Image (cartoon, helix red, strand yellow):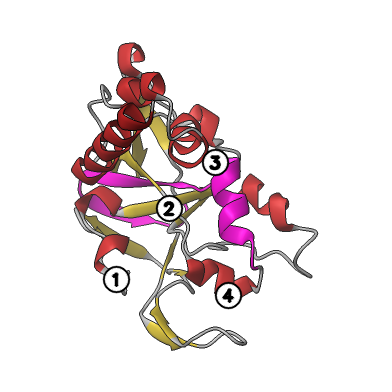
Amino acid sequence: MSTGKIESLQYKDSKPMQSAINKRPFEGDMWLSKLGFVDDEQAYKDHGGSDKAVCCFSKSNYDMYKDDLEKLPDYAMFGENLTIINLDENEVYFGNQYRLGEAIIEVSEIREPCWKIQAKYGLPNLVKRMSKSGKTGFYCRVIKEGSVSQNQHLVLIKEADPKTQLSVQELNDIYYNDRKNTKRISQALKNPYLSMKRYEKLEKMYQRATKSS
């Protein structure tokens, strides 16, 4: 579990940026509120909020970049709060609830990679590769606030309703690779756990796909 403070960062030839991407494990206990870990910061309004309170990323996805980087980080490679061992996007459904210490979190959003992680690692095609693969990580909302410590693990306590089950991998595939598939978009819109902003984006995508078909 990692948190970060906003810094002014400059990576090689990229423009200076304000970011809290460089997160580090915290010591002791930390309160997880409806807006995230209390010591965590976000530089931009779309990088936080109740539907993006906790950013999660599977450490197994780090291996996608092992041939590009001299050394892979041990944690928070892409600025995530929770670096999870072997939890694949195919197995993570919107609405899944997990206990983390005293808190309960629920999968609520896909992670849309941005240019800052690309700038940090100097890989010009990183965002495209990550998006196309669907291995982007995901966000959770906080259902129950509580204290969390480093020695506590994520425990699945409720799986999303099978009738409308939608995985992070599937929504990523629709959003990044299959934007004209009205059938898949329509099915995704039936999911009751997505954020309001995600519904709005999918509605616009559906309208554009309908017009072009």
Q: Between 55 and 100, which is closer to the camera in this rendering?
A: 55
Mark number, residue 112: 2
Proximity of marks 3 and 4: CB atoms separated by less than 8 Å: no
Residue drawn at (19%, 53%) of the image: 34
Q: Amino acid at mark 1?
A: Tyr
Q: CA distance from mark 3 to mark 1?
A: 23 Å
Q: CA distance from mark 2 to mark 4?
A: 16 Å
Q: Is residue 13 above or below residue 90?
A: below
Mark number, residue 44: 1
Element at label 2: loop
Query: Residue 70's x, y, as percent?
Result: 79, 70
Q: Between 95 and 169, which is closer to the camera in this rendering?
A: 169
Q: Earlier in the sequence, mark 2 or mark 4?
A: 2
Looking at the rendering, the stretch of residues picked out in magenta corresponds to 124-151
Q: CA distance from mark 1 to mark 2?
A: 13 Å
Residue density around tag 2, few if under 14, some if 14–19, many if 20 or more, within 10 Å: some
Q: Amino acid at mark 4?
A: Lys
Residue drawn at (76%, 58%) of the image: 66
Residue bearing the label numbered 4: 120
